[in-house]
Image (cartoon, rainbow, N blue to C red):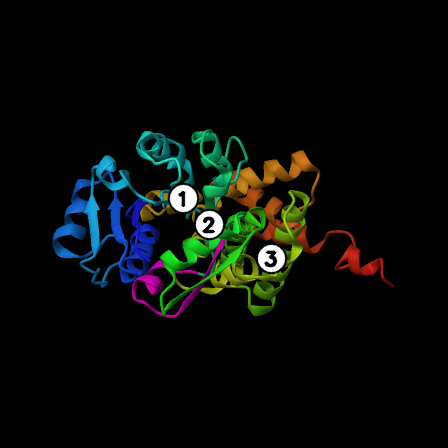
Amino acid sequence: MSTKVAVLGAGAWGTALSVPLSANRNDVWLWDRTPSLVSEIQDQRRNTKYLAGVSLPDGINATGDIERAVDGAGVVISAVPTHAIREVLAMAAPLMLPGTIVVSAAKGIEPKTHLRMTQVISEVLPEHSRSHIACISGPNFAIEVARCEPTTTVVGAKDPDTGEFLQCVLMTPSFRVYTNPDVTGVEMGGAVKNIIAIAVGIAEGMGLGYNSRAGLITRGLAEMARLGVALGAHPLTFAGLSGMGDLVLTCTGEYSRNRRCGAAVGRGESLQHFLDTTHLTVEGVPTTQAVRELSLAKSIELPVTEQVYEVLFNGKAPQEGLRSLMSRERKYESEEVARYR
């Protein structure tokens, strides 16, 4: 199967996704608004800013012309940061065919609206069939996908035909794609794991050990599931690739921007200094604020998220945040399990 695929955003993830798409002999068009980045990809088959050391296949067409990228595309993948998705999709919307499948590859929650990315897509494309809107998430560091190292991911698509089609478009011998109809769960896992990775990074920066890391990951998974289920997700989704899988990767992997950000803050560096000096997009930062506001609106207790918020945005010392977590009142590990005594 071959189709025209437009990937919007030539950052690390958008460029990396173009590699398996190209391997499947799709007509791949990678769009970005930065002329120097487009020229480097098109002329030198490299993206040194985001994927240093990777040679990109000749089948990837880079362009700064969004009309050229989107016109006639059967699949449009939005790989821009969450804050830019509305603007970019609004540019692409008039160029899309009615049956175009639109996929969110971003992992976050829109700060002001608290919407998931597929919900944002639905708002930007109100006439577009909901069955043609999907997401992709999982334990996927872009650099390893670009190197064609064995990777598993999951496509969240309510419509089974859409999910199966995207499997065919994306899956290669090194990039295994599963499908899941629980779009809410897939997206919430991808968003909340970034907050927990910041928490793990803060603990690392404070010099804490493996016990602390394991505890934060486990209780973070509980928070992810608690919030996701309250929003309509299936609890088992959080035991899968977009939940536990992505959580473990982002909390332990050396390429994790969110963990690195947290580690800097844990060592005493200010959040703004880290962002200003690294120029990295750290999706967990705005997501922390959005998820915290969402949890308050839904009256859902998220202790780790709350302390990450206090440290990042209210200047609370990491040591004080740790004390707040460790001195909470006694609890059952799981209220649901406790009811089966």
Task: Please state the horizontal and vertical placement of residue 316, each as a whole percent of the image.
Answer: 57, 43
Q: CA distance from mark 2 to mark 3?
A: 22 Å
Query: Does the residue at mark 1 contact the one at mark 2 (Cβ under 8 Å)?
Result: yes
Sequence-first tag of 3 and 1: 1
Task: Please state the horizontal and vertical placement of residue 120, each as a whole percent of the image.
Answer: 47, 35
Residue 150 part of the magenta-drawn span: yes
Q: Label 1, secondary structure: give it.
A: strand
Check disc 2 and report the residue beneath it. 162
The amino acid pointed to by label 3 is Phe
The amino acid pointed to by label 2 is Thr
Q: CA distance from mark 1 to mark 2?
A: 8 Å
What residue sits 32% from the left and 50% below the top? 14
Q: Label 3, secondary structure: give it.
A: helix
Q: Label 2, secondary structure: give it.
A: helix
Q: Residue furthest left?
A: 43
On screen, residue 194 above or below 24? above
Tell me the tag on residue 101: 1
What residue sits 72% from the left and 53% below the top? 327
Q: Nearer the viewer, mark 2 or mark 3?
A: 2
* Screen quadrant of the C terminus: bottom right
The residue nearer to you, when weighing 252 against 30, is 30
Residue 271 part of the magenta-drawn span: no
Q: Which residues are magenta?
A: 140-156
Mark 2 Cα shell of 10 Å, populated few (<14), some (14-19), many (≥20): some
The residue nearer to you, when weighing 227 against 252, is 227
Q: Is residue 107 left or right of residue 244?
A: left
Q: Is residue 241 left or right of residue 62?
A: right
Q: Is residue 199 left or right of residue 171?
A: right
